[in-house]
Amino acid sequence: MINKSRIVRIVKTKQETPTIKSLFFQDDEASKSKPGQFLMIWIPGIDEIPMSVSNINPPRITVKRVGKGTEALSSLEKNDEIGIKGPYGNGFTITGQKVLVVGGGVGVAALLPLVKLLIKENKETTVIIGAKTKQELLFKREIEKLVGKDQLMICTDDGSAGLKMMASDLATHIVEKNSYDQIYTCGPEKMIYKIFELAEKKGTPLQAALERYMKCGFGLCGSCGIGHLLVCKDGPVLDSQSLEKVKEEFGKLRRGPSGEFEKI
Ligand SMILES: Cc1cc2nc3c(=O)[nH]c(=O)nc-3n(C[C@H](O)[C@H](O)[C@H](O)COP(=O)(O)OP(=O)(O)OC[C@H]3O[C@@H](n4cnc5c(N)ncnc54)[C@H](O)[C@@H]3O)c2cc1C
Ligand code: FES
């Protein structure tokens, strides 16, 4: 079990969208991550927060500003230092031949290494990415290069790029016309929940990467609980069977910093 922060220097940064920034660094352990795994990132003097590995080699994290931890992380530049622990969690499992990948917002960060692996393994891969606006679409060019223009579908809430609809609604249209061996998803939990219902209706296996408030990242503190599962250890990727068992909380409730349930 790896539970000590390793201090790494940021070697490059890239502003991906007005609110999302990528940080690159070098680290032997992180460069052996599986798609869907995450790192605990320590920002000296501020906080320690979970971040998906958005590129495996060289390791990269891709941060959306939502509060003080992500704000501080987003303000870092080349040569600044962060502490990292991990990789933690299970990651995605490659299965089936014809697959659909659905990403919303910064959730696309966890899916990009998966799409790379799916293409490497010659899987027939269709990808849907959604965002609030055209400017906030994450990794559109990278995914287009991997899967080709025809297999990438775009949607935005305001219609400024692609179709004007939610990623879960676009997924519903696509899944009604096609059948897939496996659906993978990451993004806002309301979106994931709709895709779960869709996958259940079609009888298609699903793997979804979830987010919960995390303190330790490796199964000790219990803060990331969902039902009887710990998102840091049993997840963050949960399959249809596991999601079915935590349906009382999935898509509805999560624990906040004080351990109290809050609505999603
Ligand atoms: C396994 C895992 C992987 C993750 N990967 C990524 C990633 O690749 N990129 C990334 O940007 N984020 C990712 N997150 C989410 C990220 O960890 C949180 O956004 C971060 O911890 C928030 O910290 P903060 O101090 O900025 O916000 P806080 O000060 O803790 O919260 C500020 C406000 O933001 C809200 N908030 C907190 N978390 C989220 C959230 N996840 N989504 C929306 N609002 C939130 C809070 O409710 C609060 O209102 C991941 C989370 C998990 C569990
Ligand atoms: S974050 Fe501590 S048990 Fe999951």
Image (cartoon, helix red, strand yellow):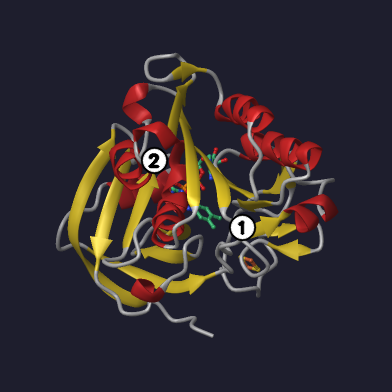
Residue 170 to residue 17: above or below: above
Given residues 100 and 57, the one toward you in this image is: 100
- Tell me the residue that label 1 is attached to: 96
Mark closer to the observer (1, 2): 1
Left or right of 84? Residue 79 is: left
Left or right? Give the position of 91 relative to 253: left
Q: Locate residue 122: give its quadrant.
A: bottom left
For ligand 1, tell me if the residue under mark 1 lies within 8 Å: no
The percent position of residue 48, horizontal first and vertical second, equals 45, 62
Q: What is the distance, in whole Å, between disc 1 and disc 2 at their CAs?
A: 35 Å
Q: Which residue is mark 2?
A: 65
What residue appears at the point 58 percent right and 46 percent down from the top-left corner? Answer: 185
Against 222, residue 67 (above or below) is above
Q: Nearer the viewer, residue 98 or 248?
A: 98
Q: Is residue 107 visible?
A: no
* 165 versus 23 height, above or below: above
Where is the N terminus found, in terms of image quarters?
bottom right
- Mark 2, ligand 1, within 8 Å: the answer is yes
Where residue 123 sits in the image (x, y, percent)? 49, 54
Query: Could you tell me which residue is drawn at 33 percent across and 64 percent down?
Result: 44
Question: 10 Å neighbourhood of mark 2: few (<14), some, or many (≥20)?
Answer: some
Q: Secondary structure at mark 2?
A: loop
Q: Amino acid at mark 2?
A: Arg
